[in-house]
Image (cartoon, grey):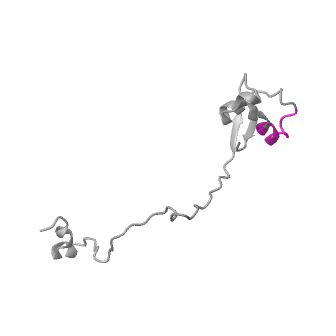
């Protein structure tokens, strides 16, 4: 008797055991075939950051992007809310765009 023979015995079929007789072997994958580019997935999820005491745009950029020099990216995305890039206040919430 094989390891799975008990599953296919007439006794188990009568008891409502699953019938796997039509299952075929093989594999499947959701990975793209070699040489075919994967479809791009755009994330429309917007990140935000709320300013805390001691923050500056360069400090926020350093934490968000790993580069303080990218402060202007945050400034440009939030020009409607930031009148002077040197004056931001605790409690302000800014959009953080992709770098």
In which quadrant of the rendered image does the N terminus lie? bottom left
Q: Nearer the viewer, residue 74 or 83?
A: 74
Residue furthest out toward the top: 54
Q: Quadrant of residue 57?
A: top right
Q: Which residues are magenta?
A: 73-83
Front residue of 95/99: it is 99
Q: Is 76 part of what is drawn in magenta?
A: yes
Residue at image coords 28%, 76%: 21
Classify the position of the C terminus by image quarter. top right
The residue under the point 51% across, 63% down is: 34
Residue 31 rendering spot, x and y as whole percentages: 49, 61
How many numbered circles does the render carry? 0
On screen, residue 85 above or below 22: above
Residue 4 image position (x, y, % from top left): 20, 66
> At which x and y percent is residue 78?
80, 40
Report the side of 67 relative to 15 (left or right): right
Asked if 72 appears above or below 39 in the picture, the reply is above
Q: Position of residue 73 (x, y in %)?
A: 77, 39
Q: Residue 51 in magenta?
A: no
Q: Is residue 79 left or right of residue 9?
A: right
Relative side of 8 to 22, left or right: left
Q: Residue furthest left?
A: 1
In the picture, residue 69 is in which quadrant? Answer: top right
Q: Quadrant of residue 5?
A: bottom left
Q: Residue furthest front?
A: 35
């Amino acid at each position: 008797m094989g390891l799975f023979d008990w599953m296919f015995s007439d006794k188990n079929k009568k008891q409502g055991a699953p019938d796997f007789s039509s299952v075929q072997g093989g594999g499947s994958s959701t990975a793209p075939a070699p040489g075919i580019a994967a479809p791009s997935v755009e994330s429309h999820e917007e990140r935000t950051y709320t300013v805390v005491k001691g923050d500056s745009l360069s400090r926020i950029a350093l934490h968000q992007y790993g580069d303080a020099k990218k402060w202007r990216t945050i400034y440009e995305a939030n020009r409607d809310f930031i009148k002077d890039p040197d004056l931001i206040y605790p409690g302000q919430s800014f959009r953080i765009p992709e770098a």
